[in-house]
Amino acid sequence: MRRIVSSASHSAFFGAVGPTVMPPLERAYRVVTRRAGPISELAVPSLVLHTTGARTGLPRRAELICAPDASDRTLFVAGSNFARPRHPGWTYNLIAYPGAEVERGRHRTRVTATLLTGAEREQAWERLDDVLPGYRRYERAAGREFRVFRLEPVA
């Protein structure tokens, strides 16, 4: 199932229509299921990220694919933004305000975000590519370096 989702979500077609189609689908999924989670949770590990707007200070939410570490507590996320040229807004938010909250299933957890570089970033990419095969190719096709974050629970 993950390979099918990966192939579809990394296609040029999805990159073109995803930004328009996915938000209403996400809203409909939340209404029908009465769940806060993203529709992608049906096929791959996913979360809802709650951040503070970097410019506005207002609450923001983003539905994202994630890669849990072996403990299933620390999560990795990449700012793919449908392979568009700009980084997604939530990455700017995490840089400005690294304290955030993550919803997975019916659980909401406070986390601290760290922007990864170097070897840590490469290790996170290995995990992300395990969860969604071909994800790294998506970064190369986008022509920019995706921001990759580690989300760790706050004690």
Image (cartoon, rainbow, N blue to C red):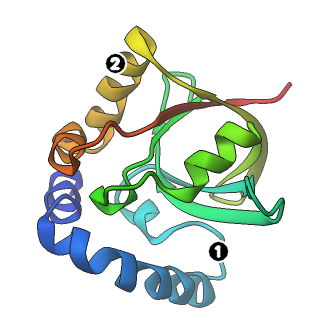
Give the residue drawn at x 58%, y 82%. Answer: 33
The foreground one among 155 and 57 is: 57
Give the image location of residue 20, x and y in percent: 37, 84
Quadrant in the picture for the N terminus:
bottom left
The residue labelled by disc 1 is 35
Residue 42 versus residue 115 in the image, above or below: below
Give the residue drawn at x 17%, y 42%. Answer: 134
In this rendering, position of residue 60 left or right of residue 8? right
The residue labelled by disc 2 is 122
Give the image location of residue 52, x and y in percent: 78, 55
Give the residue drawn at x 41%, y 21%. Answer: 121
Mark 2 vs mark 1, foreground winner is: 2
In this rendering, position of residue 78 left or right of residue 9? right
Q: Looking at numbered disc 1 in the image, what kind of residue is underneath it?
A: Arg
Which image quadrant for residue 5?
bottom left
Give the image location of residue 139, x and y in percent: 24, 42
